[in-house]
Image: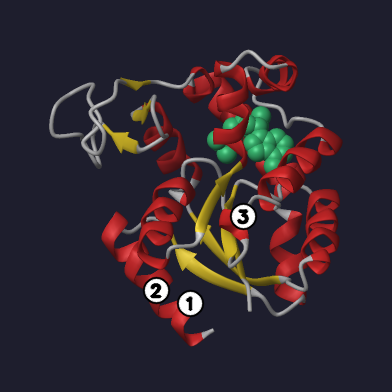
């Protein structure tokens, strides 16, 4: 038995935060496509160089390289029981590729929590977001501040503001989400897999709503 959960929702709604919490509680691997790209950028790989040219503009990295990267990640042993996918799929072509990939494991996408949020709040949250260098823990100077400014509560590493969290890029990322990713809402609804969660509540309330919904499913 495997469990694959796809977290869907606009940038800044809290997918990464919730994925980390849920991964720690459930033991399922957390796969963040954005974190994988940022790791490649840090390690100055060819994929990192390619991804960066899209990420700084708030555009999506092309499907073929993104799908290949996720395929490699899902094939690692820590995903044998399943995973929580955060930021992938982001296009219908990626969603189709994911189905095929998981069939190879005898698995499937089991459930798709869709965390929703209003545009003004997303822009505000992203512009106050601080991310940990070591492993991508996420804070917000207003809504979820670290105990000590600039330092990660979990591993003591430095917190930084992502280049693509600047207001102009955030607006483009939201537009790209609406154009290219939001069709996945009806795709997964039609497959009977979507559960809707209000992402404008506190982090704890969203976690609770997620846990209740996943238990029911
Ligand atoms: P995130 O950390 O999920 O906000 O992703 C940051 C950036 O990485 C996005 O704005 C895209 O440029 C790129 N990216 C992440 N996931 C994907 C994906 N599934 N498909 C294409 N590009 C992606």
Q: Residues within 10 Å of mark 1 (few under 14, many from 20)?
A: some
Depth check, front residue: 182 or 18: 18
Q: Secondary structure at mark 3?
A: helix
Identify residue for label 2.
Answer: 211
Q: Secondary structure at mark 2?
A: helix
**Which quadrant holds residue 180?**
top right
- Where is residue 47, by image quadrant? top right
Quadrant of the snapshot with the C terminus: bottom right
Residue at 70% x, 80% y is 192
Residue under numbered circle 3: 77
Q: Residue at x 38, y 55 (%)?
A: 200
Ligand 1 location (quadrant): top right
Disc assigned to residue 214: 1
Report if the CB atoms under discs 1 and 2 are less than 8 Å apart: yes
Q: Residue at x 78, y 57 (%)?
A: 98
Q: Quadrant of the N terminus?
A: bottom right
């Amino acid at each position: 038995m495997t469990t694959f959960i796809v977290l869907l929702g606009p940038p800044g709604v809290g997918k990464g935060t919730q994925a980390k919490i849920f991964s720690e509680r459930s033991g399922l691997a957390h796969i963040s496509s954005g974190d994988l790209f940022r790791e490649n950028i840090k390690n100055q790989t060819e994929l990192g160089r390619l991804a960066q040219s899209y990420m700084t503009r708030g555009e999506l990295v092309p499907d073929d390289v993104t799908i290949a990267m996720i395929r490699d990640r899902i094939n690692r042993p820590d995903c044998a029981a399943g995973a929580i996918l955060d930021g992938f799929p982001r296009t219908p072509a990626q969603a189709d590729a994911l189905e095929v990939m998981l069939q190879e494991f005898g698995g499937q996408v089991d459930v798709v929590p869709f965390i929703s949020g209003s545009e003004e709040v997303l822009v505000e949250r992203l512009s106050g977001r601080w991310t940990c260098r070591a492993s991508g823990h996420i804070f917000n100077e207003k809504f979820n501040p670290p105990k000590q400014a600039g330092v990660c509560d979990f591993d003591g590493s430095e917190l930084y503001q992502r280049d693509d969290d600047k207001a102009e890029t955030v607006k483009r990322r939201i537009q790209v989400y609406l154009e290219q990713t939001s069709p996945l809402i009806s795709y997964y609804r039609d497959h009977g897999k979507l559960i809707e969660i209000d992402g404008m509540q506190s982090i704890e309330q969203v976690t609770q709503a997620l846990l209740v919904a996943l238990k029911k499913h």
